[in-house]
Amino acid sequence: MKIRTRYAPSPTGRMHVGNLRTALYAYLISKHEGGDYILRIEDTDQERFVEGATEIIYQTLKDTGLVHDEGPDIGGPVGPYVQSERQKAGIYMQYAKELVDKGEAYYCFCDEERLATLVQEIDDGNGGKKQISVYDKHCLHLSKEEVEKNLAEGKPFVIRQNNPTEGTTTFHDELYGDVTVENKELDDMILIKSDGYPTYNFANVVDDHLMGITHVVRGNEYISSSPKYNRLYDAFGWEVPKYIHCPLITDEEHHKLSKRSGHSSFEDLIEQGFIAEAVVNFVALLGWSPDDNQEIMSLQELIEKFDYTRINKSPAVFDYTKLKWMNGEYLKAMDEDKFFEMAKPYLEKVIKKPLDLKKISNMVKTRIEIFPDIEGMVDFFEEMPEYDTAIFAHKKMKTNEETSLAVLKEVLPLLEAHDDYTNDSLFALLSDYIKSHEYKNGYVLWPVRIAVCGKEMTPCGATELMEVIGKDETIARIKKSIALLEK
């Protein structure tokens, strides 16, 4: 049977890293076996709906290369692919009533006041208390006549699943194996809400069956709900899909990754200067690794290598430092023209002078991890910063402020008399000077570089910098540095 997976996000805002991983793993599972990848928009929770969030979903999938085979925007044989449209077509109510007819579900007419009496306080497992509400099956015992009378009068209702209170229910997860729960722990969850919309749990089961989904990928926070899903599948007589519950993603303090971290969503990371390919690669490794432990992988390589049985059950740590390293590796390998187009806005933010930005872009390409690193690395091209002359001292180069002053005074007239300010020509000029005085390269090049940029760290050497800023600016900066050293 052909593998069919789905990504079924709710349009509630930016795409959380955990949701992106779910989307990615579902995609890799299907494409590894040549299967189908379906996009379904789950908008049944109208209160949480965020305007524009559906467009964010489409854009994120496009940016990450997770191309779906069926979905709201391209159609397919099992549409509609938006749950609110399926609700209007009466799909969920039809199947809920089928369960009522089978005795596997029932109408519940309890109002908020009565439901409030069912709230109880229990230990939360962390030394505190939490409130839960367990429905007492009150409306299960209504006669058929009472139900029909309430419906005829237009009394508000929900439809609840009729779960057993004795025995156990077992479901199988591909990673966790068989998981058994006591049926007394299964609340009679709501299938159809009072507004006529299905709950997330019920719509999931119905849609996954009708769309032929063979593998369901989701976070392991849904493990506790899976027995209820299985009871629905069994009640309908449907085949249960394979479950793959993925581990929790935590921050470096081992807390659940939240919006407060500042990098919990795909959009956050892109805005921080990461590129989509690196983010996808990194997210794939949040709980999974190939058998050869390769770390830098294209999407095609991920498809070829992905084996969901290697997903780890332990929580995955979002290592921001590792993501930056990985992003830097992608930038190093990027085509120069593409890199320049992406780097240009960051260069133009700090460099207003008519300098060769493409040349500067090439200088920083292998030295940054994320694009915002560029600004602090190249700002000296625009204007010489204020700096402490102590940075002229370098033990390894055997330089200090006095030796640097002497060198700069000697090379200044050479540079003033020289007109060819290309890197090769400038390097040859300074090399001749170094040889004639029997100096080490660093003894001369270190103070010259400091003199023209005012920084210890730069994306390239002295003569490359001088080529970019030109003769007039080079001479002016060296004179200024000489004046500072003489003070």
Image (cartoon, rainbow, N blue to C red):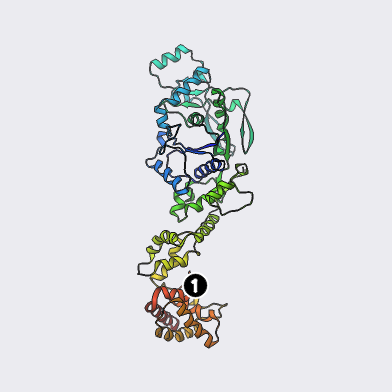
3 w.r.t. 326: above or below: above
Residue 388 visible somewhere in the drawing: no
In the image, 338 versus 90, the foreground residue is 338
Q: In this view, does 323 lie to the left or right of 193?
A: right
Percent coordinates x, y for residue 216 in the rendering: 54, 36
35 w.r.t. 333: above or below: above
Q: Mark 1 points at which residue?
A: 456
In the image, 335 versus 328, the foreground residue is 335
Q: How many labels does the image show?
A: 1
In the rendered image, the residue lying farthest to the bottom is 436
In the rendered image, the residue lying farthest to the top is 145
In the image, 55 versus 44, the foreground residue is 55
Residue 412 visible somewhere in the drawing: yes
Q: In which quarter of the image is residue 245?
A: top right
Quadrant in the picture for the C terminus: bottom left
Q: What element carries label 1?
A: loop
Q: Residue at x 49, y 72 (%)?
A: 456
Quadrant in the picture for the N terminus: top right
Percent coordinates x, y for residue 126 in the rendering: 59, 39
Percent coordinates x, y for residue 366 in the rendering: 50, 64
112 w.r.t. 254: above or below: above
Q: What residue type is labelled 1?
A: Glu
Q: Could you classify mark 1 by the number of other residues whose Cα lies within 10 Å: few (under 14), some (14-19), or many (20 or more)?
A: few
Percent coordinates x, y for residue 448 in the rendering: 47, 79
Q: In this view, does 264 lie to the left or right of 181?
A: left
